[in-house]
Image: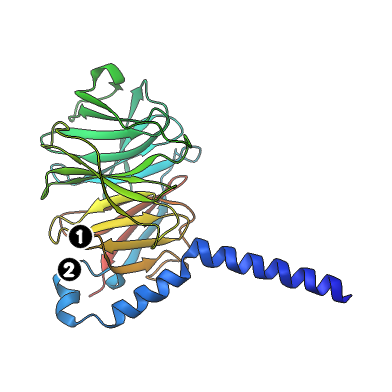
Amino acid sequence: MSRTFRLCVLAVLLIASVAALHLMRLDARALLWLQESRATAEQRASGLWLPGYQAVLQIEVPGFEKEEFSDLSYNPATDTLFTVSGKQPLLIELSLEGQLLRSIPIIGAANLEGVAVLEDGYLAVTDERQHSLSIFQVDANTKELRSEQAVQQIDLGHAEDSNKGFEGLAWDKRNQRLLLGKEKYPVMLYSLPSDGRKVTGELQELAPLDAHMTDLAALTVDPRSGQILALSQESHLLVSLNQQYQPQSFIALLRGLNGLDHYIPQAEGVALDGAGNLYMVSERNKFYAFRKAP
């Protein structure tokens, strides 16, 4: 092996290592590990402590092999979950065991990326391609939704990259707002004031998240502690943020950690139920459930 060839191989390995370091945010993860190690027992018990969760269910949802699950939201009224399909515009209701309950076409949508269950049967979805947020009323008899039936439609503004717009969406009942996450350039957390039925104010920047992850795929809010969960598919990371948007704990979505049999390939949605159990979806049709370890 010539010296030039060896140098080329080393250069390629170095570039690959730097790329992996960036995408996995190993530098930020090391700081999080250090911060977690300093947390007291009281701090761990008072909030949402992610390292205590273990995967108890890792399945595929049959019939959606060619779809792309995106985002996830818990409905406390029915004890079920909603996700959307980013390929074919569908609103999909799942049981807490990942079983399909119904699939609702949304006529007029283009590329659904976010879903949030609001109050009294109202539900919000975001369309990344159309740069919009729509609020619908959904009940047990809903079989189809049309864009013109929306209770409200909000223009979220044009993104420079049409595929790097708003992805994460979550209802924050405690603070009467919708939380939105910009996927990239920059990775940013936003809020929209809401009464749980309609948007009542203007979009506002809250905090950048670039220091913790290279992209933002989904958001959810823990109604008990008020902490925000931010999910990154590129960094294979789920991070909990406090009221000041600072990280408190995290889990890496990698094989062998937190009970995972394999790494989560493209994590796109996260939700918490009323008991604090954690759920995720990944493209294309993968479903995961996590429980707090006893």
Amino acid type assigned to the residue bearing label 2 in the image: Gly
Q: For the residues marked 2 and 1, what is the alpha-carbon distance in whole angstroms?
A: 7 Å
Relative horizontal placement of residue 158, taking residue 193 as reference (left or right): right
Label 1 Cα neighbours within 10 Å, binned few <14 / some 14-19 / many ≥20: many
SS for callout 1 = loop
The residue shown at (20%, 26%) is 141
Label 2 Cα neighbours within 10 Å, binned few <14 / some 14-19 / many ≥20: some
Against 24, is 91 above or below? above
> Dot 1 corresponds to which residue?
227
Q: Quadrant of residue 142?
A: top left
SS for callout 2 = loop
Against 237, is 68 above or below? above
Against 212, is 107 above or below? above
Q: Quadrant of residue 91?
A: top left
> Dot 2 corresponds to which residue?
47
The residue shown at (30%, 55%) is 279
Amino acid type assigned to the residue bearing label 1 in the image: Gln
The answer to whether the residues at label 2 and label 1 have Cβ atoms under 8 Å apart is yes
Residue 233: % across, % down: 44, 54
